[in-house]
Amino acid sequence: MTWSLPAFPTFLSIVLGYLLGSIPFGLIITRLAGTQDIRTIGSGNIGATNVLRTGRKELAAATLLFDALKGTAAVLIARALWGEEAALLAGLAAFLGHVFPVWLHFKGGKGVATFLGITLGLFWPAAIAFAVVWLGCARLTRYSSLSALIASIATEITASLFGTAQTALLLGLLTLLIWITHRANIARLLAGTEGRIGGKA
């Protein structure tokens, strides 16, 4: 596998992806709605699961949607301008932007919705696999974190079986990063103290 993208488009793809990914929609949406700072409740995370702890399901849904769409937008814009390699770079940068946003002192979310959006832009069948597995696991366990972890693996398997090698490689890396960002959740799952969907913590 050879890399053919010139240096300047490579740089622009990374900048584009990072800036889009770093938009903290969870914080923006909850502030516009007049709720308390989302970082002061629950897990302190800016993602949809923690927004749900405000009791405002519509705000959580909006956060999920926009956090996913920024990942999709990064991939699609970069692909349209510079090609598939740029799309892969922009997807990676968007994920890192969400997890480490410069606007919030590099303290962002765990990347699940953005991962889904990136996957949708790169290889939609893997995104469908993620959604189906996440919904099934969430219905059975009511653990958002566990559902995300299992669904990320299903995404990588789908991409490895049916997608390109480059896409599978990137989604494999993002899956590893998802597990890393969820290390505290994994510890709580093992200890039996992880909060369930709809819970207050």
Image: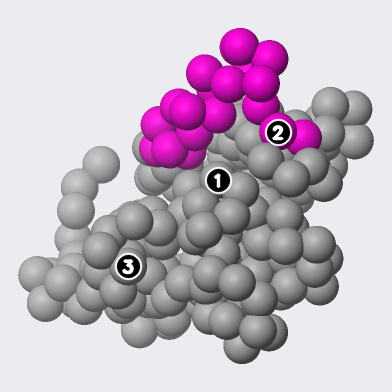
Badge 2 density bin: few <14, some 14–19, many ≥20, Cα 10 Å: some
Earlier residue among tags 3 and 2: 3
Q: Is residue 114 above or below residue 138?
A: below
Prevailing secondary structure class for the magenta stretch in the rendered image:
helix
Earlier residue among tags 1 and 3: 1
Residue marked by disc 3: 104
Identify the image quadrant of residue 68: bottom right
Residue contact between numbered discs 2 and 1, judged by CB atoms under 8 Å: yes
Is residue 194 located in the magenta-colored stretch of the structure?
A: yes
- Labelled disc at residue 43: 1
Query: Which range of residues does the magenta coloring cover?
Result: 176-196
Horizontal and vertical percent for residue 201? Answer: 67, 41
Label 3 secondary element: helix
Left or right: 119, with 22 as reference point: right
Question: Residue at 43% of width from left, 75% of height from top?
Answer: 23
Determine the CA span between mark 2 and mark 1: 9 Å
Residue contact between numbered discs 1 and 3, judged by CB atoms under 8 Å: no
Is residue 130 located in the magenta-colored stretch of the structure?
A: no
Please state which of residues 155 and 64 is positioned toward the viewer in this rendering: 64
Residue marked by disc 2: 195
Please state which of residues 5 and 97 is positioned toward the viewer in this rendering: 97
